[in-house]
Image (cartoon, helix red, strand yellow):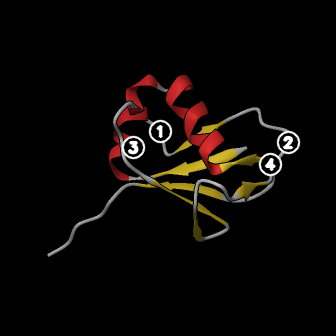
Amino acid sequence: MKIKIFASIKEKIGDDHIELPIHDAITVKELKERLYIDYPELDGEVFQVAVNESFERDESTIAPDDVVALIPPVSGG
């Protein structure tokens, strides 16, 4: 699964995407748990998960071929 990342998450990871070897559907909550384990530098990072360009809740399911993005809070002026 290829996951696009932005802003502060991108800075912490040092890349604009993450590749996870996920072959079955998982929930958004399971994805977040996996990311916090695999990328401890994200500990405490708050972000929303977008699947196929739509923000999803923790109980939503993600298929391995879905387009996933991690979106941190954005402020503007």
Do tag 4 and tag 3 residues touch (Cβ < 8 Å)?
A: no
Give the number of the mark in front: 4 or 2. Answer: 2
Disc 2 to disc 3, how far (Cα)? Answer: 25 Å
Q: Residue 64 carries which label?
A: 4
Disc 4 to disc 2, how far (Cα)? Answer: 6 Å
- Sequence-wise, which precedes: disc 1 or disc 4? 1
Q: Which mark is residue 24?
A: 2
- Sequence-wise, which precedes: disc 4 or disc 3? 3
Give the number of the mark in front: 1 or 4. Answer: 4
Q: Check disc 3 and report its element: helix, strand or loop.
A: helix
Residues packed near mark 3 inside 10 Å, few (<14), some (14 to 19) or many (20 plus): many
Q: Which residue does the numbered mark 1 point to in the structure image?
A: 15
Do tag 2 and tag 3 residues touch (Cβ < 8 Å)?
A: no
Do tag 3 and tag 1 residues touch (Cβ < 8 Å)?
A: no
- Sequence-wise, which precedes: disc 3 or disc 1? 3
Q: Which residue does the numbered mark 3 point to in the structure image?
A: 9
Disc 3 to disc 1, how far (Cα)? Answer: 9 Å
| Quadrant the N terminus occupies | top right
